Image (spheres, rainbow, N blue to C red):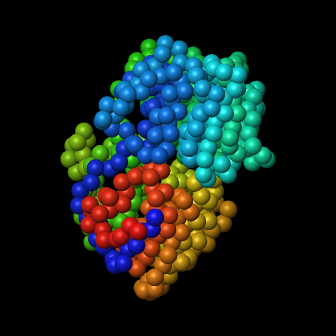
């Protein structure tokens, strides 16, 4: 499917932000492994559908209430299947590998994948499991999927020793696995990438009666206390909101976004503080319990130098924002882990930006963008999405601002934001899906 933007548009109006994909994954898995509960207003997208289907392998019963899921967990969940399909969700696969190593079940369980997830490396995940005495099998020298786990393995007496240099998702998986297994400790070598996502996991576990403490930096202590059914309202997703925020700022838009929680630990909430530092017209309205985010354009960012290590999902749309900057250069750094996403996002973002009058240069962990010295050319641009939802959404924002652009393969947005193009239409953007 293609998206064709013939002329520039203004992005304006009111929108309830889609639910957080990251929290939906965590809430479904935690409820399934602990004592069940209800998850209200979750995100229903390809990745989270895979999670909802995967947890049925734990012997839980999941009912769709129309506005969420009712999850009934057995007294002691165990694996009832020897194969679990994780789809294209790297988050789901990395969460399940530790969990499927300790939960009771059959002799082995194969974590299957499809699409680009079949070529993504899970070397750090596999290595840390093996270093702690767990048996796991992977494919090839890059430890690609499918992964074969061996359920019912015993936790070591000493704290688990992990690294989280390329992803923190397996660390979150271990926090949930320890909560299920009666508790334990983790010692992390060095700072984890995307650290706010670990805090999201910890916050959710605390809601279910699990104590997650950090007695010292990079040391986690997990203690199940009086577990209780999860009753969880999934908040809005800052990752999804970022595209509309940037789109409104780059046009003459006035936008109201509802459903975001101002103090949520989501990593991509950093976009609000970044924009505030620029003096961008972005402000919270209403009370803390019933707030909305108001965005007013037009606004062009100045030069900026930003460490995006904790929020890699923001990089493609920030790179598009940088292409319209009023200064001479924007640097996004500490982003080497973008190479192992749905696409090599570092290379993909760089390649597509260089189709515009902006110029981009990528190094091992950095992206440098130089806005055009004059106006953008009027020649038609055709963007490749690489089957990557965040590349598709980011360059759709460029397209609606500039016009005369076409994107191929935009159906990939269904991975995280199936209604993305419907919402653009609702916000006044003119384009055709072909």
Can residue 304 be seen from the camera position used here?
Answer: no
In the rendered image, residue 83, in percent from the top left (x then y), is placed at 62, 32
How many labels were placed on the picture? 0
Residue 266 figure quarter:
top left
- Furthest-right residue in this view: 141
Which residue occupies 44% across, 32% down? 27
Relative height, residue 150 to residue 317 (above, below):
above
The C terminus - image quarter: bottom left
Which of the pair 180/62 is nearer the observer? 62
Q: Is residue 275 left or right of residue 168?
A: left
In the rendered image, residue 41, in percent from the top left (x then y), is placed at 33, 38
Which of the pair 33/4 is nearer the observer? 4
Which residue occupies 36% across, 54% down? 419
Which residue occupies 35% across, 48% down? 18
- Furthest-left residue in this view: 286
Q: Is residue 60 left or right of residue 235?
A: right
In the rendered image, residue 163, in percent from the top left (x then y), is placed at 67, 39
In the rendered image, residue 224, in percent from the top left (x then y), is placed at 51, 18
Can residue 197 be seen from the camera position used here?
Answer: yes
Which residue occupies 46% across, 86% down? 379
Relative height, residue 32 to residue 382 (above, below):
above
Q: Is residue 14 left or right of residue 59?
A: left
């Amino acid at each position: 499917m293609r998206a064709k933007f013939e002329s520039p548009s203004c992005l304006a109006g009111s929108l309830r932000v889609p639910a957080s994909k990251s929290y939906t994954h965590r809430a479904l898995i935690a409820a399934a492994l602990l004592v069940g509960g209800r998850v209200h207003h979750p995100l229903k997208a390809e990745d989270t559908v895979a999670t909802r289907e995967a947890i049925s392998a734990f012997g839980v019963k999941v009912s769709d209430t129309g506005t969420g899921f009712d999850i009934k967990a057995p007294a002691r969940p165990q694996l009832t299947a020897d194969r679990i399909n994780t789809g294209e969700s790297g988050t789901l696969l990395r969460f399940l590998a530790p969990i499927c190593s300790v939960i009771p079940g059959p002799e082995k369980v194969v974590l299957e994948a499809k699409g680009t997830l079949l070529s993504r490396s899970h070397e750090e995940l596999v290595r840390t499991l093996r270093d702690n005495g767990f048996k796991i099998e992977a494919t090839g020298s890059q430890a690609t999927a499918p992964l074969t786990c061996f359920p019912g393995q015993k936790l070591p007496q000493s704290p688990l020793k992990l690294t989280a240099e390329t992803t923190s998702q397996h660390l979150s998986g271990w926090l949930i696995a320890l909560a299920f297994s009666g508790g334990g400790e983790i010692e992390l070598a060095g700072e984890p990438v995307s650290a706010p996502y670990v805090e999201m996991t910890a916050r959710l576990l605390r809601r279910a009666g699990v104590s997650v403490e950090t007695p010292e930096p990079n040391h986690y202590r997990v203690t199940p206390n009086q577990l209780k059914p999860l009753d969880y309202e999934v908040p809005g997703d800052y990752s999804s909101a970022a595209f509309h925020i940037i789109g409104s700022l780059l046009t003459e838009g006035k936008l109201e976004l509802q459903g975001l929680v101002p103090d949520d630990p989501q990593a991509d909430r950093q976009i609000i503080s970044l924009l505030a530092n620029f003096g961008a017209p972005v402000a919270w309205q209403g009370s803390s319990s019933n707030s909305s985010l108001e965005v007013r354009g037009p606004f062009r960012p100045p030069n900026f130098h930003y460490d995006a290590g904790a929020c890699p999902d923001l990089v493609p749309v920030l790179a598009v924002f940088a292409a319209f900057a009023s200064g001479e250069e924007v640097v996004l750094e500490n982003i080497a882990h973008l190479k192992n996403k749905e696409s090599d996002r570092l290379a993909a973002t760089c390649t597509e930006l260089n189709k515009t009058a902006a110029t981009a240069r990528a190094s091992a962990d950095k992206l440098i963008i130089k806005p055009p010295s004059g106006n953008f050319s009027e020649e038609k641009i055709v963007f490749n999405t690489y089957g990557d939802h965040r590349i598709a959404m980011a360059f759709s924002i460029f397209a609606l601002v500039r016009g005369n652009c076409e994107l191929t393969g935009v159906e990939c947005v269904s991975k995280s934001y199936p209604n993305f193009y419907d919402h653009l239409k609702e916000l006044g953007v003119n384009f055709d899906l072909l």
